[in-house]
Image (cartoon, grey):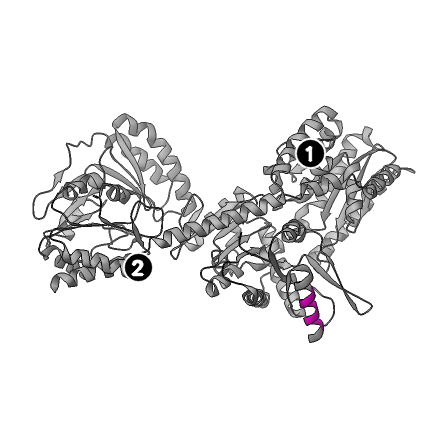
Amino acid sequence: MSRLLIVSNRLPVSVERRKGELHFKGSVGGVATGLGSYHDSHESLWVGWADVPGRLDSMERERIARELHDQHQCVPVFLSADDVRDFYHGYSNKTLWPLFHHFTQYAEFDAATWTAYERANRKFRDAVLEVAEPGDMIWVQDYQLMLLPQMLREQLPDAAIGFFLHIPFPTVEVFRMLPQRKALLDGLLGADLVGFHTYDYVRYFLGTSRRLAGTEDHGGRIMMNGRQILVDAFPMGIDFDRYAQGVEKPAARREAERVRERTRKRKVILSVDRLDYSKGIPDRLRAFAAFLERYPEWRDKVVLIAVAVPSRTRVEHYRALKREVDELVGSINGTYSTIDWTPIRYLYRGLPFNQLMGVYAVADVALVTPLRDGMNLIAKEYVAAHAGREGVLVLSEMAGAARELSEAVQVNPFDLDSVVEAIHQALTMSPEEQVERSEAMVRRLKRYTVQRWAEDFLSTLEGVKSAQIELEARLLDNATQERILEHFSAARHRLLVLDYDGTLTAFSEDPQAVQPDEWLLKTLGTLVSCPRTEVVVVSGRAHESLGEWFAELPINLVAEHGVWVRSGDEEWLTVEPMNDEWKARIRPVLESFTDRAPGAFVEEKDFSLVWHHRKVDRRLADARVAELKETLVSLAADYNLAVTEGNRVVEVRAAGVNKGRAAYRWMCREDLDFVFVSGDDETDEEVFEAAPEGSWTVRVGLAPTRAAFSVRRPQELRVLLERMAKDCDA
């Protein structure tokens, strides 16, 4: 595997100043913990912010950079105090964090913090460019660096760049609130692979990209400026053995015994979170209080250990949250405590690893109920620590981990009653059921560890780059164009089979607006008049439209995807006997879908019906197309019809009729020694397949194809046709 450059806001190593001396130690939590083990075991460099307290002189910066590079394979990015305030605490955590977690009421929109966000992303770009080498894979992490993929793409156009978002991606209605939404979306689309924890977030991103950037995707693959981008889900795992074995360490066992003594062997419910409004800690405390009220028999028999790790203490929303949590803990303990029992043991601090393992080991129930969370690794750590032993995980449906840990007791964290009942279910669950649920989750977590997650992402990134290289290898280069022109000039009998929409002309929002321009009519006219040369224009359009547009040219035409054909100045003919009796049954179906998709309309041709949805909201159109095709399946079978999907259209026509079959009447001639075929979508693949061996086949647009070559856009094909026409004039 190539060398890996990991780029994240923070490094996996923190730098501390003690008595004027600098000290280096491993960071804990978040991306640093998740990717740290992978970084340690692979050839990689980690680029990130060196969060060093106090001012640094040039000598200290140099020493820090040298030590981080030589001892920890890290490259520091030094940010000013203003950068940290406006980029990190500002735009990243006062704008993006609340919006992406759907806490829109907390989002702040400040032009100055956006400027700092751009500036900081450029600093990260510059740091990467200083160390990047040809062949490196660059993996950008999380919401603080959403502009970085495109910034790197501009400087390293051929680099393999991946991006992973560790928090939720919001719905398009929320994302579009961002004044800088286009810049952020363009930034992400600079990556070759964009990864999320769940398919829900993938779906939201693809919908947002369609709505706001006008992209199309096929199976999560987006074509952007001739480059294929893959969007996919990679649920992050944990270092399973670290937690499964961690609870067995002597220090962890001693801590577990201390906790058991202090709780007097009562049932223990554990809550561990950063103190963040997305974690739902106040709601969790209220649910615990309601549980004690509803089930008084559990008073003095259960203890909630609530660990709240300080977070963003300079942000007012977080200070207000701490006050609320402090008051709730005080109120609940004041209401229910007895002389020898305090229902909530509240710790406002992080726990060292061994202490955390001891608490994990003792906890009978883990209460993990965030209001919205990208993944939540606490849930996975708890399951690993219990590794097939008794212990119940109560997990929020709003956490990404819920998609994998289906055996947990899942709850809607906004429904207090459901959380109360889940606590009761967990405390009263039989040991056998606890072990059965645990073992199922453990098997899954053992298979998909953080190492497997990283390897899966990076191998997929390699696959995307290979696919890009394969597609680009098909691009029609200058040498190949010269060969085509030489073959064209030397040929005695030539045939050009050219698709119309998307090939000879670009698409338009109005299907009736794309008429041939003066250049196209002149060029085709020259080619048609060229000795021993035939031209066939193939289209899905109605034969009346094509006949009118090309009335002055003795050109061969195929209309309605092969239903109608015309040879030169002759009359239009149908390929085979046709009828349209089926329309009376199909038309009402299409019209009903038109009523449910504003902007859609039905186009009626002689022997086909076309449902156009180019003007329909992209997300709605995708849903309606899937539903329409499913609805048409049985009807199509009854009437021997084919249902095909083209560029923003669904067409119904007689089965067995297609462009390839119609064009074959010209391509089957034995005297042809030059055949050139070009198209742009799935319906044109039928023509490529029907083309005789030795044909020159070119697809417009980079996509998997039977064509031998590709060009990125119609204009490039026009240039080649113009050169053929000039050869005829000569």
Q: Nearer the viewer, residue 84 or 295?
A: 84
Looking at the image, is 99 positioned above or below residue 249?
below
Q: Is residue 223 visible?
A: no
Query: 433 left or right of 541?
Result: right
Rendered location of residue 233, percent (x, y): 53, 44
Q: Give the side of residue 545 with respect to residue 334, left or right.
A: left
Q: Main secondary structure of the magenta part?
A: helix
Q: Residue furthest bottom?
A: 58
Which residues fall within the magenta stretch?
Answer: 60-67
Query: Distance of mark 2 from mark 1, alpha carbons?
Result: 66 Å
The one nearer the camera, 602 or 32, is: 32
Quadrant of the image containing the C terminus? bottom left
Q: Earlier in the sequence, mark 2 or mark 1?
A: 1
Instruction: Say if the magenta span includes residue 61.
Output: yes
Residue at (50%, 54%) from the top-left corner? 176
Residue topped by disc 1 = 417
Residue placed under numbered mark 2 in the picture: 477
Above or below for 245 versus 585: below
Q: Amino acid at mark 1?
A: Asp
Residue neighbourhood size for the residue with mark 1, other residues' Cα within 10 Å, grouped as few (<14), some (14–19), many (≥20):
some
Q: Residues within 10 Å of mark 2 (few under 14, many from 20)?
A: few
Instruction: Indicate whether residue 507 is drawn in magenta.
Output: no
In percent of the image, x 29 and y 27: which residue is there? 637
Amino acid type, callout 2: Asp
Q: Quadrant of residue 726?
A: bottom left
Mark 2 or 1: the one toward you? 2
